[in-house]
Image (cartoon, rainbow, N blue to C red):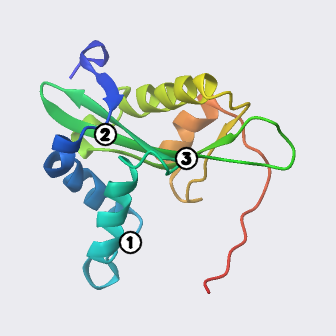
Amino acid sequence: MHEALITVRAIARDDHDRWLPLWDGYNAFYGRSGPTALPAEVTAMTWSRFFDANEPVHALVAESGGELIGLAHYLFHRATTTIGPLCYLNDLFTSEAARGKGVGRALIEAVYREARQAGAPRVYWQTHETNRTAQALYDKIAERSGFIVYRRAL
């Protein structure tokens, strides 16, 4: 696969069956598979949000040779420090065969374009501290914020 053959586009309703293995792969990468898998209703709701004009959640896919090889899910939200919405890159994943071939970069650059078009002054995302491969790319195309994420399940 050559980088020039990668097309990034908005997800379409008929992509579901080709998107689902990427979504499952993304969740498995972060330990959400088998007994810890996301409930089917979460996947169904996530999918439906991409096509709901009242939702701030969007999806892009990377395609090569008619095969979906990557996904990016992002959302816009308000912030107290900006007028325009911030863009949060929620999920980014490429198939194993597509890794190291420019797919992740192409997806992130496409999210940057969508964010600019929406008037967002910033795109941001998180990755796990052990995801060194992804960090090698991220360090080239973004800056580390220095913030530490805290969370508590409710």
Residue of label 3: 75
Cα separation, mark 2 vs mark 1, equals 18 Å
Residue 109 lies, with reference to residue 35, above or below; the image says above
The quadrant the N terminus occupies is top left
Identify the residue at image location x=35%, y=64%.
45
Q: Amino acid at mark 1?
A: Gly
Task: Name the N-terminal-most of marks 3 and 2.
Answer: 2
Q: Amino acid at mark 2?
A: Gly
Judge left or right: residue 98 versus residue 52. Answer: left
Task: Give the x, y percent position of residue 31.
Answer: 38, 72
Q: In the figure, residue 102 lies in which quadrant?
A: top left
Residue of label 1: 31
Tag 2 secondary structure: strand
Residue of label 2: 70
Task: Name the N-terminal-most of marks 3 and 1.
Answer: 1
Task: Give the x, y percent position of residue 16.
Answer: 19, 49
Mark 2 touches mark 1? (CB < 8 Å): no
Given residues 134 and 82, the one toward you in this image is 82
Residue neighbourhood size for the residue with mark 2, other residues' Cα within 10 Å, grouped as few (<14), some (14–19), many (≥20): many
Identify the residue at image location x=26%, y=74%.
40
Cα separation, mark 3 vs mark 2, equals 17 Å
Asked whether residue 33 is in view, the answer is: no
Mark 3 touches mark 1? (CB < 8 Å): no
Identify the residue at image location x=59%, y=59%.
129
Cα separation, mark 3 vs mark 1, equals 23 Å
The mark closer to the camera, 3 or 2, is 3
Task: Name the N-terminal-most of marks 2 and 1.
Answer: 1
Mark 3 touches mark 2? (CB < 8 Å): no
